[in-house]
Amino acid sequence: MTFRITKKFEFSASHRLAGLPPEHQCARMHGHNYVIELELGADDADLLPVGFVRDYGELSTFKAWLDEHLDHRHLNDVMDENPTAEHMAAWIYKTWSTKFPELTCVRISETPKTWAEYRP
């Protein structure tokens, strides 16, 4: 890809992670202020006529979905898989890559120092 754009989104949610020892902090219910970055890419020939990979305004549909389905929710009730940042990044990519075929990567942060990335 010659060109890449990213847009950041934020939401808050709780989760607990299965498969960890009971004394592990993530085995208990806890919450995060998540940051999600969507990365979209295109080559010169695939840019929109105006020169965009995609109009950032079109990503408002993702923000509306995020607010409705994930913000202030318990992620264990929303996702079928253990709601790790890694699984969430893959799930969001698979859900949105059909709507945004330019989607190349989903990155998720649970804390300012940690990121998980799904890039097929």
Image (tube, rainbow, N blue to C red):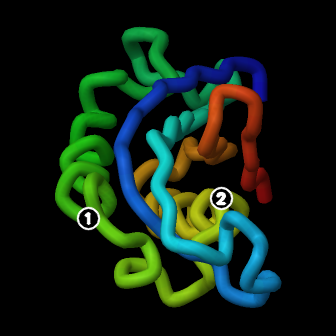
The image quadrant of residue 115 is: top right
Dot 1 alpha-carbon crowd within 10 angstroms: few under 14, some 14 to 19, many 20 or more: few
Would you place residue 55 above or below residue 68 in this image? above
Looking at the image, residue 44 sits to the left or right of residue 94; the answer is right
User: Which of the pair 12/46 is nearer the observer?
Assistant: 12
Residue 84 drawn above or below residue 113: below
Mark 2 sits on what residue? 85
Q: Earlier in the sequence, mark 1 or mark 2?
A: 1
Q: Nearer the viewer, residue 53 or 61?
A: 61
On the image, numbered disc 1 is attached to which residue? 69
Q: Which mark is residue 93?
A: none
Please provide percent x and percent y for residue 72. Answer: 26, 56
Residue at x 58%, y 30% (from the top left corner): 46
Between 11 and 62, the residue placed more toward the observer is 11
| Residue 8 point in image, percent of width and height | 47, 27
For numbered disc 2, what is the local secondary structure? Answer: helix
Point out the image quarter for the N terminus.
Answer: top right
Residue at the spot 32% in from the left edge and 60% down from the top edge: 70
Q: Quadrant of residue 48?
A: top left
Vertical comparison of 79 with 48: above or below: below
Vertically, is 2 above or below 31?
above
Residue drawn at point x = 76 percent, y = 76 percent: 23
| Three-letter code, disc 2 | Ala
Q: Position of residue 113 (x, y in %)?
A: 75, 29
Badge 1 element = helix
Residue at mark 1 to residue at mark 2: CA–CA distance:
16 Å
On the picture, is 63 further left or further right than 24?
Answer: left
